[in-house]
Image (cartoon, rainbow, N blue to C red):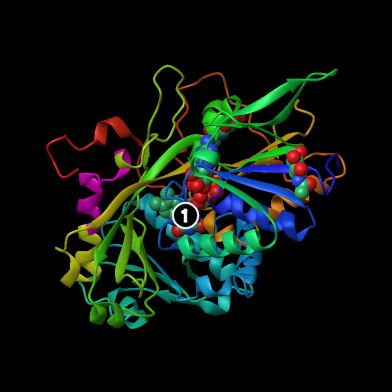
Amino acid sequence: MGISKSDAIIIVGGGAFGLSTALHLSQKGYTNISVFEKDDNIPPRFSAANDLNKIVRAEYEDPFYTDLTIKAIAAWKTPLFAPHFHQTGFLHCVSGAAPEKAVDTLNRFQASAEKHPDIKPHVVPLENEKDVRQACWQLDGELTGWHGYLNRYDGYAHSGNALAAIYRATQAAGVRFFLGAQGAVSEVVYASTLTGRKCAGIRTKNGRFHPSALVIVAAGAGAGRLVPEIGTSIVAKSWSVAHVQLTDEETSALRGIPVTYARDLGFFFEPDPKTNLLKLCPMGGGYINTDPKTGVSHAPETLSESAFLPEADEKQLRQLLAQTLPSLANRPFVRNSLCWFADTNNSDFIVDYIPNMAESIILLSGDSGHGFKMFPIVGSFITDLLESPDNRQSITRWRWKQPSSDAGKEDWGGDVSWRLGQSKEFASILPSKASKL
Ligand SMILES: Cc1cc2nc3c(=O)[nH]c(=O)nc-3n(C[C@H](O)[C@H](O)[C@H](O)COP(=O)(O)OP(=O)(O)OC[C@H]3O[C@@H](n4cnc5c(N)ncnc54)[C@H](O)[C@@H]3O)c2cc1C
Ligand SMILES: *[C@@H]1O[C@H](CO)[C@@H](O)[C@H](O)[C@H]1NC(C)=O
Ligand SMILES: *[C@@H]1O[C@H](CO)[C@@H](O)[C@H](O)[C@H]1NC(C)=O
């Protein structure tokens, strides 16, 4: 363990992983923690977690992540996090038109939920449309061929509010925040040592150098720009987010509905009572933005480039609503955007030192679009790593992923079992200038 409690620690990124890290480090007694965030506001608009809500479901196909989420859900129920966790249940289905791959994945999720002693008592199998309607009477669409299960152990978290709450809590605990022009990191700075190289700190876009004993890069889809060594092992990828504006009455009528998810279509959440927005996401292979020169996908630099809903996704979301809440099926979609995250080819996180840098820089990334549920505990992955007696990540699957030299030839994780459909290039789905942008 090279780092002492008073050493300067810099966290790059004030999103889900960065804020959780700041919280856990300060709780462990580290006293000189600074978070650098390029937006001038937290929740940052660039964060994949900046919006209304994220699914918190415990069952994974992989028991490793199931056990981890059970720990996370216990932490969601503690006072700091509880206001933002809503255990509404998770209605997990396929529609009658779902391809076999989606049905198989659903079956594996259901088997995982039914096998786990903590989760099993909360699972209700739903064999047909009638069962689904019984589980959630508000769904008054045809639900043609829908089947699956309801898991009352699960629910969702209000992600934007949870980020704001941990921002306030860590600030109160003495964590320093550099936001906006002061917080946008242009590069990690390295220095030569007698034995090799070491991270010396970071430089911000305004030219200032900030020294530190340890840098933790928690920059979400922006990680590849700061840590180019990770190459194609991290793929900036995005999925669509859209909302329907409801009235007070409509929001009220949908209060308490479970997260409603058809694997072949997408999902939506209980409407947010503050804004009366019902958030939806289509399920698919997502969009990548590959630099043809390097084969590496990076998120676009500006938010406005991502502020639209691809046509195919809009169609899919209208089908989802027609099946479930038909009175909303033709409403305009508002606050549309593509939400960028850091994907790995097997959906495993990366929580490790960058090799050969004398334990001076950690990459915390590869959330793979399923990391928010871990928000209350992510920071403990870092404190565990700092306490590891041999400076090694003991969880093999979270170790540094050396990129293969076949840049551009990987399949970008499009074939991970819980995803449906291949990733498409961002450039190929951009709306024409004349249309609704
Ligand atoms: C559409 C969508 C749906 C999702 N649904 C779920 C779900 O249902 N359940 C779930 O558990 N997870 C879900 N996720 C995933 C979840 O949002 C992410 O796992 C989580 O936000 C990852 O946290 P992060 O801190 O790594 O990245 P982010 O939250 O994206 O934060 C990264 C931060 O780094 C900052 N940054 C980047 N570069 C720099 C720089 N150079 N200088 C300073 N700051 C920088 C950014 O501004 C940003 O604030 C979803 C993601 C998407 C896109
Ligand atoms: C934190 O570390 C920085 C960089 O080394 C240093 O300038 C600053 O004085 C330290 N702050 C405290 C409170 O120790
Ligand atoms: C994922 O990438 C790693 C290299 O980072 C490689 O060794 C591995 O074979 C890849 N796995 C799959 C399933 O493509």
- Does the magenta run of residues contain 310? yes
Prevailing secondary structure class for the magenta stretch in the rendered image: helix
Residue at 72 percent across and 29 percent down: it is 200
Label 1 crowd bin: few (<14), some (14–19), many (20+), radius 10 Å:
many
Residue 274 appearing in the image:
yes
Q: Quadrant of the N terminus?
A: top right
Give the mark count: 1
Q: In the rendered image of this protein, does residue 128 appear above or below residue 308?
A: below
Q: Which residue is mark 1?
A: 49
Magenta region, residue range: 305-317
In this rendering, position of residue 357 left or right of residue 195:
left
| Residue 191 % position (x, y) | 74, 21
Residue at 75 percent across and 34 percent down: it is 360
**Which element is circle 1 on?**
loop
Residue 345 appearing in the image:
no
Q: Nearer the viewer, residue 133 or 4?
A: 4
Ligand number 3: quarter of image: top right
Name the quadrant containing residue 269.
bottom left
| Residue 418 % position (x, y) | 45, 50
Name the quadrant containing residue 29.
bottom right
Q: Quadrant of the C terminus?
A: top left
**Does the Cβ of the disc 1 residue fall within 8 Å of ligand 1?**
yes
| Residue 295 % position (x, y) | 45, 22
